[in-house]
């Protein structure tokens, strides 16, 4: 079975640009969460979606947005990119939005120059 | 405010050694404590997890020790191998209400020399 897949794996953007990151959850999983992992730190929670509805939001500016599609895949959008947005963006999927363990994808490495 | 404090930041041991990674938490509502292993270029993978109703849990060469009164927990890796070289994250979340989103520690980079 395929795990959580994220695309692209690497991305280089210029300050001020917009970026869209994509995530396909494990088959049967209905919840997707997004995390930002800055080099040398643990993942920081950005968003959680379950059944296409936002169930949680971390302490990130409004430049960050996300959505979940009917097939449970998800997109993370970041507007007006800053140098500080450079990080590994991780997507995790789980069967439901509460007690189930989450499984992480390999991440998208975003570099803002 | 860092709710889960992890130490040390890095650790180097010889093959067969027993590296120990420590974590401390502040939020008494946390009642589920997972550990994740992350290799370069990969996402974190769940290694082992514990709930506060037990003081120790073993899975293969990995053991979690939990001290509820001190709000501390630690990961021991028995008979460590070079393949265990990775970054390890502790985390904490609630399992019975409140925030189900895990709060991660800063991570420990482990190197096991052959």
Image: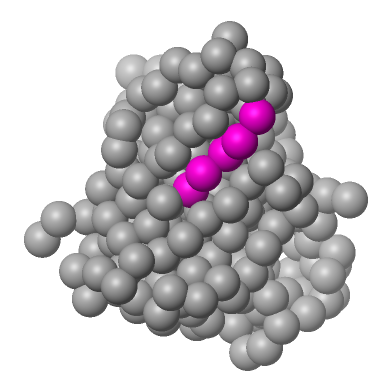
Front position in the image: A107 or B87: A107
Q: Dividing the picture into quarters, in which one does residue B79 lie?
A: top left
Quadrant location of the C terminus of chain B in the rendered image = top left
Highlighted magenta segment, given as a residue range: A76-80
State the image coordinates of residue A34 (x, y, percent, origin top left): 51, 53
Kindly give the residue lying farthest to the top in the view shown.
A113
> Which residue sits furthest right?
B1
Q: How many numbered discs, if any?
A: 0
**Going by the picture, which residue comes out furthest to the left?**
A1
Nearer-the-camera pick, B44 or A31: A31
User: In the picture, residue A74 is in which quadrant?
Assistant: bottom left
| In the image, residue B83 lies in the stretch drawn in magenta | no
Is B90 left, or right, of A51 in this rendering?
A: right
Residue A112 visible within the image: yes
Q: Residue at x 59, y 83 (%)?
A: B95
Principal secondary structure, stretch drawn in magenta: strand
Residue farthest along the bottom direction in this orientation: B96
Q: Is residue B31 left or right of residue B47?
A: right
Where residue A1 sits: x, y (%)?
10, 61
Name the residue rendered at 34%, 66% in the picture.
A69
Please state the horizontal and vertical placement of residue A98, each as a whole percent of the image: 52, 81
Residue A100 can be seen in this image? no
Q: Position of residue B92 (x, y in %)?
A: 65, 65
Residue drawn at the location 41% of the way across and 65% of the way down: A68
Q: Residue at x 75, y 46 (%)?
A: A61
- Above or below — where is B1 with respect to A89? below
Lateral position of residue B61 relative to residue A84, left or right: left
């Amino acid at each position: 079975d395929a795990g959580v897949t994220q695309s692209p794996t690497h991305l280089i953007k210029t300050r001020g640009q917009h970026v869209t990151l994509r995530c396909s959850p494990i088959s049967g999983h209905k919840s997707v969460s997004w995390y930002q992992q800055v080099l040398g730190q643990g993942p920081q929670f950005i968003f959680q979606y379950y059944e296409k509805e936002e169930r949680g939001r971390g302490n990130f500016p409004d430049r960050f947005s996300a959505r979940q599609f009917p097939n449970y895949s998800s997109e993370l959008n970041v507007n007006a990119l800053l140098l500080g947005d450079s990080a590994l963006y991780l997507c995790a999927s789980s069967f439901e939005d509460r007690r189930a363990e989450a499984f992480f994808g390999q991440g998208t490495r975003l570099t803002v120059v | 405010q860092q709710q889960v404090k992890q130490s040390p930041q890095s650790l180097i041991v010889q093959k067969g050694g027993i590296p120990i990674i420590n974590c401390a938490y502040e939020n008494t509502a946390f009642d589920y404590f997972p550990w994740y292993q992350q290799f370069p270029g990969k996402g974190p993978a769940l290694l082992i997890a514990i709930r506060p109703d037990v003081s120790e849990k073993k899975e293969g060469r990995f053991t979690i020790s939990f001290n509820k009164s001190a709000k501390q927990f630690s990961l021991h890796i028995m008979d460590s191998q070079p393949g265990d070289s990775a970054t390890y994250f502790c985390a904490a979340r609630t399992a019975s209400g409140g925030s189900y989103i895990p709060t991660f520690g800063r991570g420990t980079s482990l190197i096991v020399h052959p």
